[in-house]
């Protein structure tokens, strides 16, 4: 028996409008990547052997670092980005400008996983995300809004419909 052809209803798109091209000067992006590499030195990743470092730049210029912390019960692993957020929020910071993330290789992009994108989104979709892997060895700068379009977040719980 043939299934009925689904009717695709016209709806207001839930996708948010893209931000203007991400703006972060190269010196700041490079410095933040360096802080992420330093944090990576503390990664506890005996199971994956995939050390990750993150450095979160707060709106007031403070930098909060994080590294991945694995566990013998594998599912309890904490990603570097979420450790950085926990570090920052537990010290009173809630407004952030950018986060740099580095995986095991200094020059290969390592984008935040889906869970980390959601956790970062809690503190604002305009957050810039810096990884290695840009043109000519420069940092690659993108925004969380690009990495997690149409995200569910606190605005939706307040009853606001994303623009
Ligand atoms: N990992 C992170 O720290 N951040 C990510 O966004 C991706 C994955 C960690 C988790 C685990 O310890 C290792 O990388 C391999 O998945």
Image (cartoon, rainbow, N blue to C red):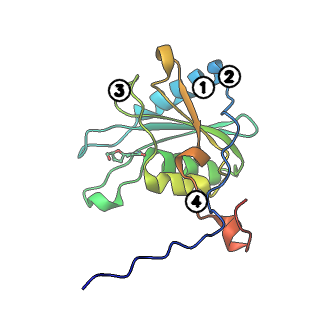
Q: Are marks 1 and 2 in contact (CB under 8 Å)?
A: yes
Residue 132 pos. (x, y %): 47, 26
Q: Which residue is mark 1?
A: 29
Marks 1 and 4 sit apart, C-alpha to C-alpha, by: 25 Å
Could you tell which of marks 1 and 4 lies nearer the N-terminus? 1
Task: Name the quadrant of the N terminus.
Answer: bottom left
Residue named by callout 4: 151
In this rendering, would 45 be left or right of 36?
left
Q: Which type of secondary structure does the marked residue at label 3 adopt?
A: loop
Q: Position of residue 124 (x, y in %)?
A: 67, 52
Determine whether label 4 and label 2 are within 8 Å by CB: no
Q: Name the quarter where the C terminus is drawn.
A: bottom right
Seen from this angle, which residue lies furthest bottom? 1
Please identify, in this view, whether the residue under mark 1 or under mark 4 is nearer the observer: 4
Q: Which residue is mark 2?
A: 25
Badge 4 or badge 2: first in the primary sequence = 2
> Is 74 above or below relative to 128?
below
């Amino acid at each position: 028996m043939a299934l009925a052809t689904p009717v695709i209803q016209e709806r207001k798109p839930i996708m948010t409008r893209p931000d203007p091209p991400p703006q972060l000067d190269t010196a700041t992006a490079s410095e933040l990547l360096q802080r992420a590499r330093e944090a990576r030195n503390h990664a506890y990743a005996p199971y994956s052997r995939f050390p990750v470092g993150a450095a979160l730049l707060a709106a007031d210029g403070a930098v909060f670092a994080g590294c991945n912390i694995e566990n013998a019960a594998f599912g309890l692993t904490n990603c570097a980005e979420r450790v950085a957020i926990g570090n920052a929020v537990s010290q009173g910071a809630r407004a952030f400008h950018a986060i740099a993330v580095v995986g095991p290789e200094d020059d290969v992009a390592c984008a935040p996983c889906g869970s980390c994108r959601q956790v970062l989104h809690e503190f604002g979709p305009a957050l810039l995300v810096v990884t290695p892997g840009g043109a000519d060895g420069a940092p690659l700068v993108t925004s969380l809004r690009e990495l997690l379009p149409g995200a569910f977040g606190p605005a939706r719980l307040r009853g606001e419909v994303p623009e």
